[in-house]
Amino acid sequence: MEKELLADARHRMDMAFEAVKTEFNTVRSGRASVGLLDRIHVDYYGTSTPLKQMANIAAPEPRLVTIQPYDKTSMKTIEKAIMESDLGLNPSNDGSVIRLPIPSLTEDRRKELVKMVHKLAEDGRIAVRNVRRDCMKDLKELVHEGEVGEDAEKRAEHDLQKATDDHVHEIDELLKHKEAEILEV
């Protein structure tokens, strides 16, 4: 029984780590990245549609992202969605391709982004710790009901703490790399 609890906890911790990784990809650094546009949704015929489902997105140069819509009539709505986003980018449209030049980040903007990335990492750590807390509570209930012995509980708690430490360490490593990427001039 405790093995299923631990497996479920590890799975939920993995999901928390993947969520942090996905959020980090949407944070702008000095380089062009197609992941930058993952959060952009476009109003397409009355439906909020992710931009990546509506267009071919590429980063042909270090400071340029190109967006080639599958439906040319949606170009204006895509441009509008990008301008209304929190990315602070100005698209240029040549009729078939939308170009998104990525300007260099100012020192103040870099510091803001580093603070934002630190908050995202802390949210991920909290999510991992919440999974640990929930699993510990479930283990205590199993011991109280007599389904699991105290030795098995201690072993499971030790394994759970190790999994928690491993996931927090992975998040910290991801944070270190993202911070270096943002601060790179």
Image: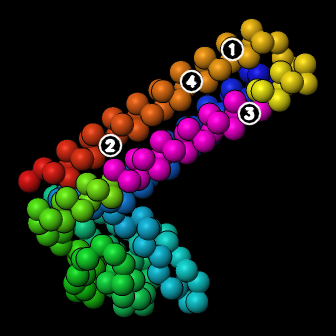
Q: Which residue is mark 4?
A: 161
Chain-order first, disc 4 or disc 1: 1
In the image, what residue occupies the spot 60% across and 42% down?
A: 130
- Judge whether residue 120 is colored magenta: yes
Please identify the residue farthest to the left as the structure is shown: 185
- Type of amino acid under label 4: Gln
Chain-order first, disc 4 or disc 3: 3
The alpha-carbon separation of the residues under discs 1 and 2 comes to 31 Å
The x, y position of residue 145, in whole percent, is: 91, 24
Q: Which residue is mark 3?
A: 137
The alpha-carbon separation of the residues under discs 4 and 2 comes to 21 Å
In the image, what residue occupies the spot 53% across and 76% down?
A: 49
Q: Nearer the viewer, mark 2 or mark 3?
A: 3
The alpha-carbon separation of the residues under discs 4 and 1 comes to 10 Å
Badges 2 and 3: C-beta atoms under 8 Å apart?
no
Chain-order first, disc 4 or disc 2: 4
Left or right relative to 106: residue 32 = right
Note whether 82 is above or below 64 in the view shown: below
Q: Which residue is mark 1?
A: 154
- Judge whether residue 132 is colored magenta: yes
Badges 1 and 2: C-beta atoms under 8 Å apart?
no
Q: Which residue is mark 2?
A: 175
The answer to whether residue 75 is seen in the rendering is no
The x, y position of residue 146, in whole percent, is: 90, 19
